[in-house]
């Protein structure tokens, strides 16, 4: 097929366990670890024979992204004996790290809240080296990428828009990579680099001598294009580029306005990728184009936004694609790398790719050609009544498996937690529009999004067990709402805020914590310079706004800090403006702060991909104060995914409020073990073995919890007691 690469060279209730085995609660007084910067120490594990180690060298465990470990030392019979083997405190406090560490050659590579990189002895947690770039990173950073050949080891780490190549043994930048060991992701996009906002939330993937990356871009306008790029692992030189917003002559160009490739943005791979090494295919899921919620600037289906792309990993040429949402105006990104799985069709085994979604669906395709393994139906949905908007007449949905999150909400489904909460929820619900999938937003009336903006599935991704063919995916099941408003001409700090910031923080600056922080009462540590810096450069989930003029940045920062809206001269305004704007993410919570729909509010699901049927489904997580009153098994919002092992276990943290780390029987969903962590673990674990001892490590940090919940930043490894 014609490519677009530019080559540049080179619900059931949880089964109750008769005995709930609880591991050590906090037992984490911490190890006094020396902060050794740039100095390599020999890990104690280095003397162990290589065959005794089982590594976790890729994000997702292996290039196929199935989050599976063949280790079975820890199993159903002994998991109740797990204890803390070591813990490592980053010393930096919370920051939304979300890192799944990598383990290779007896060393564990991880990221701190400020996006410093550390290498630890994987057997002891002792720090071996620490890399500090001098650039302070903020927000989610889900890990690093690793390459090795002929004894050479490289760790690829991102800090804001910089991508570094570090010596795996010492942590020192490799000067022959890019310029002085790093490359600037803003460059090579055929737009002014100084006006681009791009960073890596999720690490890239390695294939042969290529590092393939996407990036996180703005969800409002203006936005950086979501090109997928491959860099030479040794030199940092660009080897190929795939344009997710097609250029003239490229496949999909006619699904956009003719000028879109010059001004449109996003359609980006922020969630990460998976690699079929044998076939030489890289699978890259993409998100929506900007602006997310009003698409008058991008009439058409908008390939390759909201698309699963199968690309030739050597050249970047498109092999096949599937677009899940045409002309997305609901922010229905593909949220995680797909899992490359093997399923049974009759008597035949088929190599397949499974993609989970925010909408709560699993799409399953034949890996080599994109043929659906369960039928996909194109169903009609209502048009938009917002002037200037264009909506697709149909959207595709798989007929199997059944969705793992509820698809619609009715009055009967609202909370019964208390009579007062239900009365409030019913009255509020009757003011909303919609309640079923793909209902366009309205101006001045809240429209229901269910599953909410954060899924369904999220970035943690699924785990797949090749022994049973079961796919494990955790999901959120909470209602969100949103609306549009008429855009005013940008002549004041408030109007600039509404156009650029209200998308996330809302018209009132209240946000939707913890996902979207409140900007009210920021406190003494924030001054005009600090707010201006974040407005310009971005922080956490927030992109930077390099296109705003200095006057714009100052005016919007003054408004956020003081509430005063200074008028701006018309020629000072430097924003891309549409007739309508998004008013912010609104979570449908009752007056006490709990979801206003009936539980479950979060689930863990096991799906047989060969049959499309569910093996089990359980609530995941609890609110401790509700559980103490007898309201158990509600499930909660959860971020960070599961891992599955040959020992018969599914391990997962993820839950926002109970700070638990759990192990379930992978066949039945029965809870076999849980422990309380010092902070909630909104990250995916990693599983490995060193010196014949199996470990499970997870990052506990607490940023997704409530403001009063404990927060910090520790990597905590569990193992069986030593003889």
Image (cartoon, rainbow, N blue to C red):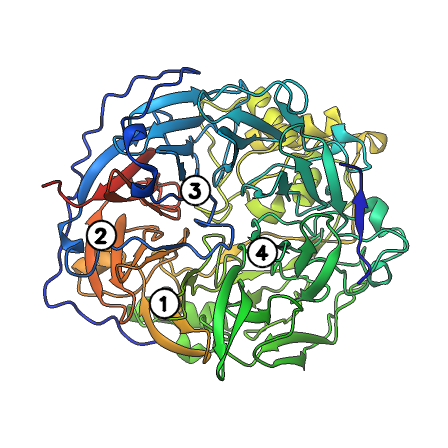
* Foreground label between 4 and 3: 4
What whole-number distance in Å separates the C-alpha atoms at marks 4 and 3? 30 Å
Q: Position of residue 128 (x, y in %)?
A: 36, 22
Q: Is residue 200 left or right of residue 458?
A: right
Label 4 Cα neighbours within 10 Å, binned few <14 / some 14-19 / many ≥20 = few
Q: Are marks 4 and 2 in contact (CB under 8 Å)?
A: no
Q: Which residue is mark 2?
A: 73
Which numbered dot is residue 278? 4
Which numbered dot is residue 98? 3
At 71% across and 53% down in the image, what residue appears? 289
Q: Which residue is mark 1?
A: 467
Relative depth, front residue between 133 and 283 = 283
Q: Where 9 sits versus 588, above or below?
A: above
What whole-number distance in Å separates the C-alpha atoms at marks 2 and 3? 27 Å
Label 2 Cα neighbours within 10 Å, binned few <14 / some 14-19 / many ≥20 = some
Residue 591, image quadrant: bottom left
Q: Does any portion of residue 249 appear in the rendered image?
A: yes
Helix, strand or loop for disc 2: loop
At 55% across and 54% down in the image, what residue appears? 585
């Amino acid at each position: 097929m014609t490519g677009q690469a530019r080559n540049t060279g080179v619900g059931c209730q949880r089964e109750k366990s008769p005995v709930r085995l609880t591991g050590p609660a906090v037992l984490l007084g911490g190890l006094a670890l020396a902060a050794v910067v740039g100095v390599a120490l020999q890990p104690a594990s280095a003397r162990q024979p290589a065959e005794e180690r089982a590594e976790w060298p890729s994000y997702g465990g292996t290039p196929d992204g199935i989050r599976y470990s063949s280790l079975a030392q820890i199993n159903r019979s002994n998991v109740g004996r797990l204890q803390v083997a070591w813990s490592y405190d980053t010393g930096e406090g919370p920051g939304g790290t979300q890192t799944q560490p990598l383990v290779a050659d007896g060393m564990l590579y991880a990221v701190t809240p400020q996006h410093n990189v550390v290498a630890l002895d994987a057997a002891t947690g002792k720090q071996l080296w620490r890399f500090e770039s001098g650039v302070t990173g903020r927000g989610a950073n889900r890990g690093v990428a690793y390459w090795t050949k002929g004894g050479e080891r490289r760790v690829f780490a991102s800090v804001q828009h910089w991508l570094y190549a570090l010596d795996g043994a010492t942590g020192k930048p490799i000067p022959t990579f890019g310029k002085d060991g790093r490359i600037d992701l803003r460059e090579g996009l055929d737009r002014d680099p100084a006006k681009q906002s791009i960073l890596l939330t999720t690490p890239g993937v390695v294939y042969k001598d290529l590092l393939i990356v996407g990036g996180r871009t703005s969800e409002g306008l203006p936005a950086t294009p979501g090109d997928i790029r491959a860099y030479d692992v040794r030199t940092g030189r660009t080897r190929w580029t795939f344009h997710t917003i097609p250029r003239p002559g490229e496949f999909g160009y006619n699904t956009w306005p003719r000028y879109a490739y010059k001004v449109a943005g996003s359609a980006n791979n922020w969630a990460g990728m998976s690699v079929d090494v044998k076939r030489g295919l890289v699978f890259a899921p993409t998100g929506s184009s900007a602006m997310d919620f009003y698409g008058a600037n991008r009439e058409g289906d908008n390939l390759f936004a909201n698309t699963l792309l199968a690309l030739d990993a050597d050249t970047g040429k498109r092999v096949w694609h599937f677009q899940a949402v045409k002309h997305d105006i609901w922010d229905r990104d593909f949220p995680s790398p797909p899992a490359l799985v093997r399923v049974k069709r009759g008597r035949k085994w088929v190599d397949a790719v499974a993609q989970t979604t925010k909408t709560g669906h699993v799409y399953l395709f034949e890996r080599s050609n994109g043929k659906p393994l369960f039928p996909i139906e194109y169903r009609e949905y209502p048009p938009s009544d917002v002037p200037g908007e264009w909506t697709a007449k149909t959207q595709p949905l798989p007929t199997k498996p059944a969705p793992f999150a509820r698809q619609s909400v009715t009055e009967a489904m609202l909370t019964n937690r208390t009579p007062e909460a239900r009365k409030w929820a019913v009255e509020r619900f009757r003011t909303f529009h919609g309640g079923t999938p793909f209902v366009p937003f309205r101006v001045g009336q809240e429209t229901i999004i269910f599953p909410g903006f954060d899924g369904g599935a999220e970035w943690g991704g699924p785990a797949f067990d090749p022994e049973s063919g079961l796919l494990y995916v955790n999901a959120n099941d909470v209602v969100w709402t949103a609306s549009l408003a008429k855009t005013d001409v940008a002549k004041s700090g408030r109007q600039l805020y509404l156009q650029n910031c209200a998308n996330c923080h809302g018209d009132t600056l209240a946000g939707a914590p913890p996902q979207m922080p409140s900007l009210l009462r920021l406190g003494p540590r924030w001054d005009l310079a600090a707010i201006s810096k974040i407005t310009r450069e971005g922080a956490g989930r927030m992109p930077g706004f390099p296109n705003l003029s200095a006057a714009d940045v100052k005016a919007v920062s003054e408004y956020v800090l003081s509430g005063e809206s200074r008028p701006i001269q018309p020629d000072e305004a430097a924003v891309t403006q549409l007739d309508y704007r998004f008013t912010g993410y609104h979570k449908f919570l009752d007056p006490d702060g709990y979801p206003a729909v009936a539980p479950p509010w979060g689930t863990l699901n096991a799906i047989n991909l060969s049959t499309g049927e569910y093996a089990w489904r359980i609530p995941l997580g609890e609110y401790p104060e509700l559980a103490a009153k007898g309201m158990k098994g509600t499930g909660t919002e959860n971020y960070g995914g599961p891992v599955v092992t040959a020992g018969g276990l599914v391990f997962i943290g993820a839950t926002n409020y109970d700070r638990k780390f759990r192990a379930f029987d992978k066949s039945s969903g029965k809870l076999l073990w849980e422990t309380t962590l010092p902070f909630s673990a909104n990250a995916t674990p990693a599983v490995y073995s060193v010196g014949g001892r199996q470990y499970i490590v997870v990052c506990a940090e607490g940023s997704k919890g409530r403001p009063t919940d404990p927060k910090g930043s520790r990597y905590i490894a569990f193992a069986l007691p030593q003889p």
